[in-house]
Image (tube, rainbow, N blue to C red):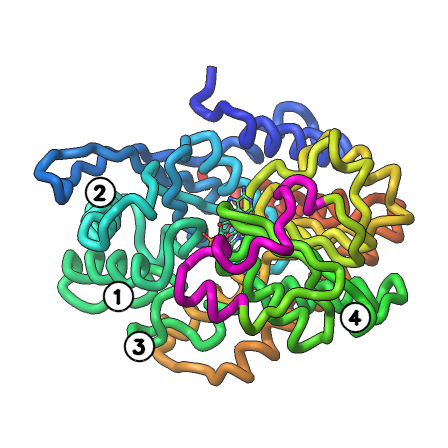
Amino acid sequence: MTIYTGPVFDMARTQFGIIADHLEIPHDERDRLLYPKRAIAVSVPVHMDDGSTKVFQGYRVQHHLTLGPTKGGTRFSSKLDVGEVAALAVWMSWKCALAGLPYGGAKGGVACDPPSLSRRELEVVSRRYMQEMIPFVSPQTDVMAPDMGTDEQVMAWFMDTYSMHQGHAVSEIVTGKPVALGGTEGRREATGRGVAHLVNRACESIGLRPGDSTAIVQGFGNVGSVSAYTLARRYGVRIIGISDHTTALYDPAGLKLDDIERHVSRHGVLAGFTREASIGGAELLEQRCDILVPAALERVITAENAPRLNCRILAEGANGPTTPDADAVLEQRRDEIFVIPDILCNSGGVIVSYFEWVQDLQRLFWTETEVNSRLEQLLDGAFEKVRFRAAERAVSNRTAAMAIGVEQVRAGKRLRGLFP
Ligand code: NAD
């Protein structure tokens, strides 16, 4: 029996099993690598605006503390459960190890629906959640960041709640804060910027000119929108499809990103922009394009639609967008589709979060140019490692990336012993 159940954790477990077989890890070592060190579940009671009291469930899963503190985002989403949080924590561990960051993985969140909460209710949920987590987090044990449904403001409330408890400002307790509170330049854009940078590297690898290429992006939140803007404005890619939870737009002649940006900053969602270019969300993923960027949810590329993907590069901006069954299909299509696996593709976010933590600890802040150039340096290092290993062992980019991450964590655990 385990508390880690559900389709997302099953997916993380299956992926790990494939890598453990590939690395020939003895069976009695596998559970220690896969199962989280600890999981915390809390109740978050809130006085709602209508006078009622509601109790939300909150979680934090810390996967391993072998190489340093744990690090990971906080997700506010109505369907959140501990299995999903644990899977995301496990993926964070492989991601941090691949990028060479001194962290284990963590993830947390509250099962709530942010759009249905008033600003006051959102603040109370955020503060109470952090209050309940205070015994289990610190800049040396677990550092939170934003994820789906949370943003800089939520990080500011977390930081304030923790700091009030300590009696002084502790900016290094969270990353993804506003710059005015010790956040770093470039964090908000880091994940999408990293996605676009790695897409450009992938284009070089397969001989595709970004300026002659088209892209479709699923999800128009932090990661999706910045990926689309950067691909278009920095690399000259034509964006022909985008979607969010309200609608999907597709125009092979290219979408007007500047107008879309204005619309979204005013209305918060894509719905209402135009009816002319609308298309089904699932259908959008299968349209012909050079670059496909799933940047919203888990498990959207499945064994069912993987044979019909019509792209040259699959850049996984989201965490876990591709199921292991779909991966088996993509493995067969390795010569047609270049996969940039999630733990590499979206690692720009945690890399710049690491820079933020380092700057806060040192009270010494960098310019945005410095942040971006160091980000590209670490991304290039990880990309080269993955490409080298994939070529040397004749394995997929995902297998190569995960194997590097798992090996790193395993080496740390072997050296330290059973405790961390
Ligand atoms: P966000 O909340 O800012 O945006 C999520 C977007 O997905 C929204 O535009 C939403 O409308 C859209 N969406 C939801 N359901 C959809 C559907 N059915 N079809 C199409 N779009 C849908 O979240 P985010 O921070 O951009 O995170 C997106 C993904 O990237 C998540 O998997 C997250 O774990 C991952 N990620 C985020 C970061 C980061 O720095 N924010 C870093 C690494 C990975």
Whether tag 2 and tag 3 are in contact, CB under 8 A, the answer is no
**In the picture, residue 139 is in which quadrant?**
bottom left
- Residues under labels 1 and 3: Cα distance? 13 Å
Residue occupying the far front of the picture = 276
One can see residue 169 in this view: yes
Q: Viewed as shown, does residue 45 lie left or right of 60? A: left
Dot 3 corresponds to which residue? 180
Whether tag 4 and tag 3 are in contact, CB under 8 A, the answer is no
User: Residue drawn at (29%, 44%), measured in percent from left and top?
Assistant: 116
User: Residue drawn at (73%, 68%), measured in percent from left and top?
Assistant: 238
Q: Viewed as shown, does residue 174 lie left or right of 348? A: left
User: Could you classify mark 4 by the number of other residues whose Cα lies within 10 Å: few (under 14), some (14-19), or many (20 or more)?
Assistant: many
Total labels drawn:
4
- Mark 4 or mark 3, earlier in chain: 3
Dot 1 corresponds to which residue? 170
User: Could you classify mark 1 by the number of other residues whose Cα lies within 10 Å: few (under 14), some (14-19), or many (20 or more)?
Assistant: many
Of tags 4 and 3, the one toward the viewer is 4
Whether tag 2 and tag 4 are in contact, CB under 8 A, the answer is no
- Residues under labels 1 and 4: Cα distance? 42 Å
Dot 4 corresponds to which residue? 210
Of tags 2 and 4, the one toward the viewer is 4
Dot 2 corresponds to which residue? 132
